Amino acid sequence: MEKKEDNYNKHNELHAFLIPKVDLLEVLAEGIDAVRAYIGVEKIKENGKDKYVEKLMIVGTKLDPATGIYVDMITDGSTNEKLEATVDSIYDFTRPCPSACDPNSPLNI
């Protein structure tokens, strides 16, 4: 994911994300202490042109009592022995609004 925050939001409309129920149930089933959501933009090719699709990535976190920090439960090849991280799922099946919007929602302005 590349950072497009400076100019991206000036030209693209985003109100919300549709999050599949299964994503929420699976991340909660990981025995976590909290959930963190990251916002990103994925660059894809569509008809030979660059297109940017908004993403909301959900990861489980565990509280590190020594630091008070909620640590993302993502493994990158290294291990977090202190927290004994055994899960490394990032849930990214969200769909941006627009196009996955409720047109009658008062929050969709």
Image: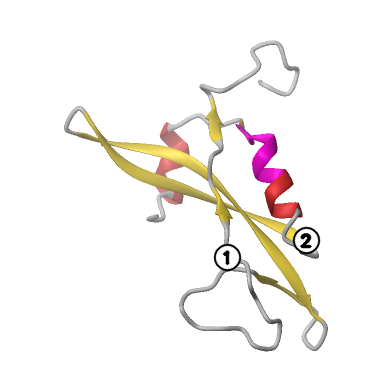
Q: Residue at x 75, y 17 (%)?
A: 106
Q: Residue at x 41, y 55 (%)?
A: 3
Query: In the rendering, which numbered label is found on residue 73?
Result: none
Circle 2: residue type: Ala
In the visual, does 109 lie left or right of 100? right
Q: What residue did someone put label 2 on?
A: 34
Query: In the rendering, which numbered label is found on residue 88?
Result: 1
- The mark closer to the camera, 2 or 1, is 1
Residue 53 on image: x %, y %? 42, 37
Quarter of the picture containing the C terminus is top right
Residue 57 on image: x %, y %? 56, 50
Task: Compare residues 21 and 40 and report the one nearer the observer.
Answer: 21
Q: Secondary structure at mark 1?
A: loop
Residue 102 on image: x %, y %? 66, 17
Q: Residue at x 64, y 12 (%)?
A: 103
Q: Is residue 38 above or below residue 106?
A: below
Cα gap from disc 2 to disc 1, whole angstroms: 14 Å
Q: What are the residue bounds of the magenta stretch?
A: 17-24
